[in-house]
């Protein structure tokens, strides 16, 4: 859960994790920090943030985050392109799961 959606109970849990399980706490904090990347509007600032975040993730020595950093490095330029042109194919992917409009149903429907 993101820090802006976190309840007091979630914050207490996170604080307990800080002392009891540092790996989970660190992963949670890095996950929350990474969410800020998608809100950058300037590619230069996004690039600086991403490089610093990747360094912090590598220093965490968590295997799953290290693999994620490898993926980020392999697609670094394409990820930064998203900041310049925030286009995705999510709308196209979502279209397939929706019912066709009623007119399309009427034309395509074969009552026989």
Image: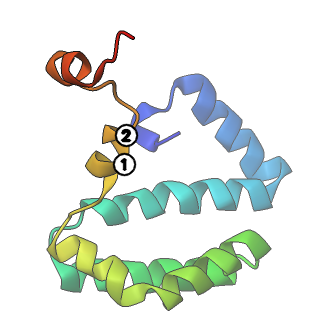
How many circles with numbers are drawn on the protein? 2
**Which residue is found at the position 76% from the left and 79% from the top?**
61
Q: Are discs 1 and 2 less than 8 Å apart at CB?
A: yes
**Secondary-structure class at tag 2:** loop
**Secondary-structure class at tag 1:** helix
Q: Which of 46 and 10 is in front in this view?
A: 46
The vertical placement of 68 against 38, above or below, is: below
Q: Which of 39 and 102 is in front in this view?
A: 102
Image-quadrant location for residue 37: bottom left
Instruction: Using a 10 Å C-alpha cutoff, classify the residue at mark 1 as few (fewer than 14 neighbours), some (14 to 19) or many (20 or more).
Output: few
Q: Can residue 19 be seen in this view?
A: yes
Instruction: Using a 10 Å C-alpha cutoff, classify the residue at mark 2 as few (fewer than 14 neighbours), some (14 to 19) or many (20 or more).
Output: few
Q: Position of residue 76 (x, y in %)?
A: 41, 87
Q: Can residue 101 be seen in this view?
A: no
**Which residue is found at the position 53% from the left and 39% from the top?**
1
User: Label 1 vs label 2: CA separation?
Assistant: 6 Å
Q: Where is residue 32 in the image (x, y as percent from the top left)?
A: 49, 54
Q: Which of 80 and 2 is in front in this view?
A: 80
Q: Position of residue 63 (x, y in %)?
A: 78, 75
**Which residue is found at the position 55% from the left and 58% from the top?**
31
- Residue hosting label 2: 96
Seen as rendered, the residue at the extreme right is 20
Is 27 situated left or right of 17 in this image?
A: left
Q: Indicate which disc residue 28 carries.
A: none
Q: Indicate which disc residue 93 carries.
A: 1
The vertical placement of 53 against 105, above or below, is: below
Q: Position of residue 107 (x, y in %)?
A: 19, 22
Q: Nearer the viewer, residue 103 or 27?
A: 103
Seen as rendered, the residue at the extreme top is 111
Image-quadrant location for residue 41: bottom left
Quadrant location of the C terminus in the rendered image: top left
């Amino acid at each position: 859960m993101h820090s802006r959606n976190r309840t007091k109970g979630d914050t207490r849990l996170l604080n307990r994790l800080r002392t009891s399980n540092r790996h989970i706490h660190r992963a949670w904090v890095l996950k929350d920090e990474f969410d800020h990347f998608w809100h950058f509007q300037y590619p230069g600032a996004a690039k600086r943030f991403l490089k610093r975040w990747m360094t912090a993730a590598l220093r965490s020595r968590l295997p799953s985050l290290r693999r994620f950093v490898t993926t980020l490095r392999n697609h670094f330029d394409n990820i930064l392109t998203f900041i310049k042109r925030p286009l995705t194919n999510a709308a196209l992917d979502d279209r397939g799961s929706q019912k066709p409009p009623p007119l399309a149903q009427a034309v395509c429907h074969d009552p026989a």
